[in-house]
Image: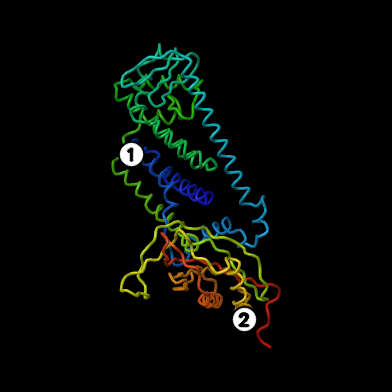
Amino acid sequence: MLLIYQIKVGLCLIAFYLLWKLLLSRETFHRFNRVALLAVMALALVLPWIKITLSAPTAVSEPMVVLEELLVTPAAAGDAQQASQPWSVLNVANLLYFIGMAIAIGWLLLGQWNLRRLMGKGRTEALADGVTLHIVPGDVSPFSYFKHIVINEQDYRDNPREILIHEHAHIDLRHSLDVVFMSVVTLFQWWNPAAWLLCRELRQVHEYEADEAVLNANVDVKQYQLLLIRKSVGDQLFSMANSFNYQSLKKRIRMMTMNKSSRWSRLRALAAVPVIALALLAFANPSIDAAVAVNETASVSNDKSVQSPTSQLTKAEVAPVTIDDNEKSDGKSKKIYRSCEQMPRFPGGEIALMHYLSDNIQYPPEAAKNEIEGRVIIQFVVEKTGEVGEVKVVRPISEELDAEAVRVVKTLPKFEPGRQDGEAVAVWYTLPVSFKLQGDPEPTDK
């Protein structure tokens, strides 16, 4: 679901921002830093989509597993009534997220409108390489936007060379494409300070690159720094533009006077590798990532009362996989689908499946005596014939509860088999079974 995905992206961005500030933010290889910042933001968007299946939760992945359960299956946390209410925590969180995103879109569109309106106020001149120069009235800080440079009348008269070199550098280096990408990231991650901070760092690197281009054009360093100081007041900025004086003046002047960083300093970027590995491990989820069907949770109590369906698992859209097992009828590996066009169906539907489990599962006396309860996640194969094949526990609770859940699953009657392209196929099926004590556990010793 979108909310979980955005949380995962946000966690990645926070980790990458801290890594950047600690290791690379003070280095002078600006082109490398620019690529590094773009890469980590792109990685943050991609990593949550990479699925790794673990046989059991780890200390790293457990917090994310719990969070996903609270968001995807709030009833599993004992909040079934709230989950059905329109003002549940999940619904309110989604509403606030989309309201914030709508405001961010409105702010972005307003900035675009102001930018276009400003460029239409003054006169224009055609420069080399298809660049259009807009000379506008008023106290406007020079900026560039794709193939457009905006400069006010006074700057055009007094300091055209330095400013135009600076803005041409933004255009030649295609900084506007980075700005568009940053706008997309902050649009979806409007709530995350790390997203905005990373974008600020990237804009700062843009200014370092443009400043470097000016100094490489044999402009006097002191004269250029004085120009920056004079232009540090009265700026008008646009979110989608590269401004002549966008970032901290002190940082820019200091960067001009710093010694060049060693090439070996780039190796610090390798510190991102363990962070990426940790993120993949944290996002691995045997009960959610391996979920292959939308199922109701059967809740079994020690007094045999039948509760309402409590939750649904997220359907994982993954490609069919081929695995080797002991059930080979033709000497070849059997193809077992993780998802198919028509998923297997229990006779009578999910409610019937819930009642079957409630009627046939017996609360283990030892578990009741020790007041053990929880939710066991069972995964099994529904064969082409509809029969239950391999059964395994992907989320254990205790030996007694796990064994009882497996025992009853193996007794399930035939399903209507899953179908792909009109043909019956073997499909993995995930079934959560909740064991919950009600009242005092029944005595087991007399």
Foreground pick, 234 / 422 = 422
Instruction: Give the residue furthest to the bottom.
Output: 446
Which amino acid type corresponds to the residue marked 2 in the rendered image? Pro
What's the residue at 61%, 43% (across, down)?
A: 96
Foreground pick, 310 / 263 = 310
What's the residue at 49%, 42% (across, down)?
A: 194
Q: In this view, does 326 lie to the left or right of 122?
A: left
Question: Please, what secondary structure does the residue beneath circle 1 have?
Answer: helix
Foreground pick, 221 / 193 = 193
Q: Where is residue 306 in the image (x, y as percent from the top left)?
A: 66, 71
Foreground pick, 181 / 83 = 83
Is residue 172 shown above or below 418?
A: above
Q: Position of residue 29 (x, y in %)?
A: 33, 37
Q: Position of residue 385 (x, y in %)?
A: 44, 72
Which amino acid type corresponds to the residue marked 1 in the rendered image? Phe
Colour mode of the rendering: rainbow
Q: Bin the neighbour count of mark 1 within 10 Å (Cα to Cα): few under 14, some 14-19, many 20 and up.
A: some
Q: Is residue 87 left or right of residue 207?
A: right
* Count of residue discs: 2
Q: Name the residue under label 1.
A: 32
Q: Give the CA distance from mark 1 to mark 2.
A: 64 Å
Judged by depth in the image, the label closer to the viewer, 1 or 2, is 2
Check the picture and name the quadrant holding the C terminus.
Answer: bottom right
Residue 356: image tag:
none
Q: Name the residue under label 2.
A: 365
- Which quadrant of the view contains residue 229? top left
